[in-house]
Amino acid sequence: MPVPAPKTQLPPAYKKLPGRGTNFLERITLYLASDHLLYVASSGFSESYRRFYYRDIHSVSVHKTASGLLFNVLSGTLLLLCLVGALSTGGAAGWIGWGIPAALCVALLLINILRGPTCVCDIHTAVQSRRLYSVNRLPRAARILAVLRPLLLAAQGQIDPDEFRQRIDAARQSAFANAAPPVIGHSFR
Amino acid sequence: MSSGVAAACPKCRSALPGALCNTPAPVRCPACDALMQVELFPAFFQPAAAGQSAEPIVEEGVSSCFYHEQKKAVTHCDACGRFLCALCDVEFNGQHVCPACLQSGKQKGRLPHLESSRAVWDSAALFICLAPLLLFPVVIGTAPVAIGVAIFSFFKPGSIIPRTRIRAWLAIGLSLLEIAVWVYIFFYAD
């Protein structure tokens, strides 16, 4: 007996969240739907999707990384080298010749500074954690958290902030009390 | 993360006190000094949902599950109408469906909420159109293929995210241009 398929459902309406990132193999973007966050990994000819339902999201964590600073140091060093090159060469040709790469370095430096410090952002549910590669700047992370927070609280309900902190502290104490002895090969700080 | 697990610094994984979670701006981790922000939501404290178990039939005349004759039916499949026990009942997007219908719906592409990947034919058409330009003479073979793939993309479901058909039209336009240039170079140019 052939199995009938359920009625065709319309895909939900998606709204793009700011930012685009890459994990070297795929281009990552995030979209908002009415009840979930869609993580789209595009590899050119195909797209894979992961859905994080608002009711299931446990936490979103962000931490600053040093890659933005490293980029600034690298661009600054190159800019300095260009200036030294221009000074040592001298003349209009030297200034024009070294000025073009110097201008490029200044542009890259300014863009990087204006975009803000770099960060990594992870989303956690009960069964998985995923890095959100498109959220790679702290200001962008703040904007996305501001968009996500009300949606997640609407789906999960509100908790009084003081009670929330108490429950986090209680969970922390409980985790310390039930901590397993260290396993050889694991690093603990 | 789940109930009973402490909130941790995303960098060093050390347990964080409540005062350092859900802060309006990033704060420093007391253990590694990294600038971080951890936003926890009420689901963090919810215990893991226990799986349902089907009730056995203990009296005569009670409807049984289509898949498990010894189990009591609790609902019916909205797609095929078969009676289902609590174990076979999959509540999905406001519908109660049986695992077989769910599988069938997924295979036939009728449940966009379950789709985990899609081919994007319009991007493929654009790639087939543009990549061979590096070896121009071969475009006479690839341009018609690109046109075919672009037309094929109009009849296939595209990405589930909002997207225009500009890539497909661009692939058709550029491929026609490639064919015209190829014909001009190889037949009319001196």
Image (cartoon, rainbow, N blue to C red):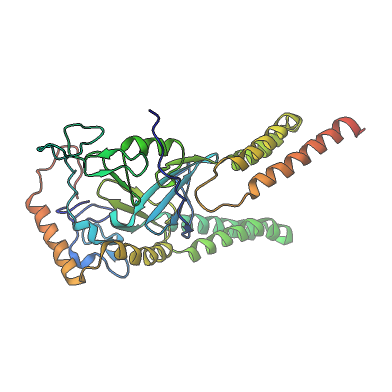
Q: In which quarter of the image is residue A60?
A: bottom left
Residue B87, x across and y down, in percent: 22, 39
Residue B158, x across and y down, in percent: 55, 44
Which residue appears at 19% of the width and 47% of the height?
Answer: A188
Residue nearer the viewer, A147 or B35: A147
Q: In which quarter of the image is residue B72?
A: top left
Residue A152 falls left or right of residue B86: right
Q: Using the rendered image of the protein, determine whether residue B177 is visible from the camera's viewpoint.
A: yes
Q: Quadrant of residue A85?
A: bottom right
Residue extending furthest left? A177
Residue B182 drawn above or below residue B167: above
Residue A1 falls left or right of residue B168: left
Question: Which quarter shows the C terminus of chain B?
Answer: top right
Residue B139 falls left or right of residue A130: right
Residue B164, x across and y down, in percent: 60, 52
Residue A179 drawn above or below residue A138: above
Residue nearer the viewer, A176 or B145: B145
Residue nearer the viewer, A86 or B186: B186
Count of numbered tags: 0
Residue nearer the viewer, A94 or B85: B85
Residue extending furthest front? B61
Residue extending furthest right? B190
Q: Using the rendered image of the protein, determine whether residue A57 is visible from the camera's viewpoint.
A: no
Residue B180, x across and y down, in percent: 82, 38
Residue A94 drawn above or below residue B179: below
Which residue appears at 39% of the width and 55% of the height?
Answer: A37
Which residue appears at 43% of the width and 63% of the height?
Answer: A140
